[in-house]
Image (spheres, helix red, strand yellow):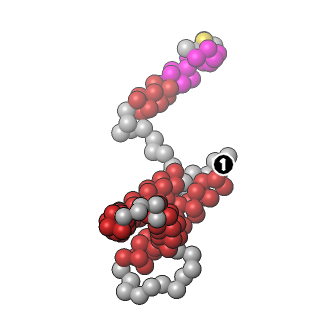
């Protein structure tokens, strides 16, 4: 019996075999082409917080789908959708009420009309920005999940 480099008492041939196996293992781990492949899972991050990841997946999917659907309804459809719960409808109702309330303070009719004329193009840019931000948040949730 001799003491191997690992500290285990073994016979001489067993010690040589153990030393050789350990050296091959270390060489394989150092060489990325010879390293053992990681097992591929389902792609879902299931850990101690698995339900949070699944909730993020569902929420991200809903945000992306509803943003794209609302943009399609607003920009492409030739008729007004009958749905009551639409993001763009709520956006225009809220911003138009605030914009006209601030426009009532302007005494000159000409200046008030110029102020109100800015709302249309500005609201389109803000709405596009809101849709883009919603898509970024939705895809970030999908990526995290």
Instruction: Specify the quadrant of the image occupied by residue 115.
Output: bottom left
Q: Residue furthest top?
A: 2
For the residue pair 36 and 2, the one nearer the viewer reads as 36
The magenta segment? 6-20
- Tell me the residue that label 1 is attached to: 49
Label 1: element kind: loop
Task: State left or right for residue 58 relative to residue 36.
Answer: right
Whole-percent x, y for residue 116 in the image: 37, 67
Q: Residue at x 54, y 82 (%)?
A: 83
Give the number of marks: 1
Where 85 falls versus 131 (above or below)?
below
For the residue pair 143 and 126, the one nearer the viewer reads as 126
Where 51 falls versus 27 (above or below)?
below
For the residue pair 140 and 6, the one nearer the viewer reads as 140
Whole-percent x, y for residue 8 in the image: 63, 17
Q: Residue at x 41, y 61 (%)?
A: 106
Instruction: Specify the quadrant of the image occupied by residue 129.
Output: bottom left
Whole-percent x, y for residue 142 in the image: 50, 57
Q: Main secondary structure of the magenta part?
A: helix
Per the image, is 70 magenta?
no
Per the image, is 11 magenta?
yes
**Callout 1: few (<14), some (14-19), or many (20+) C-alpha neighbours within 10 Å?**
few
Q: Quadrant of the C terminus?
A: bottom right
Whole-percent x, y for residue 90 in the image: 53, 70
Q: Quadrant of the N terminus?
A: top right
Q: Residue at x 64, y 15 (%)?
A: 9
């Amino acid at each position: 019996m001799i003491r191997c480099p690992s500290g285990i008492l073994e016979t001489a041939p067993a010690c040589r075999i153990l030393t050789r196996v350990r050296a091959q293992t270390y060489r394989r781990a150092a060489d990325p082409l010879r390293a053992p492949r990681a097992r591929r899972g389902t792609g879902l991050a299931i850990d101690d917080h698995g339900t949070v990841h699944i909730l993020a997946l569902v929420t991200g999917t809903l945000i992306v789908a509803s943003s794209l659907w609302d943009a399609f309804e607003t920009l492409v459809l030739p008729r007004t959708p009958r749905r009551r719960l639409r993001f763009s409808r709520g956006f225009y109702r809220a911003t138009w009420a605030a914009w006209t309330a601030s426009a009532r303070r302007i005494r000159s009719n000409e200046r008030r009309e110029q102020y109100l004329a800015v709302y249309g193009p500005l609201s389109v840019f803000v709405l596009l920005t809101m849709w883009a931000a919603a898509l970024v948040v939705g895809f970030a949730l999908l990526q995290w999940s």
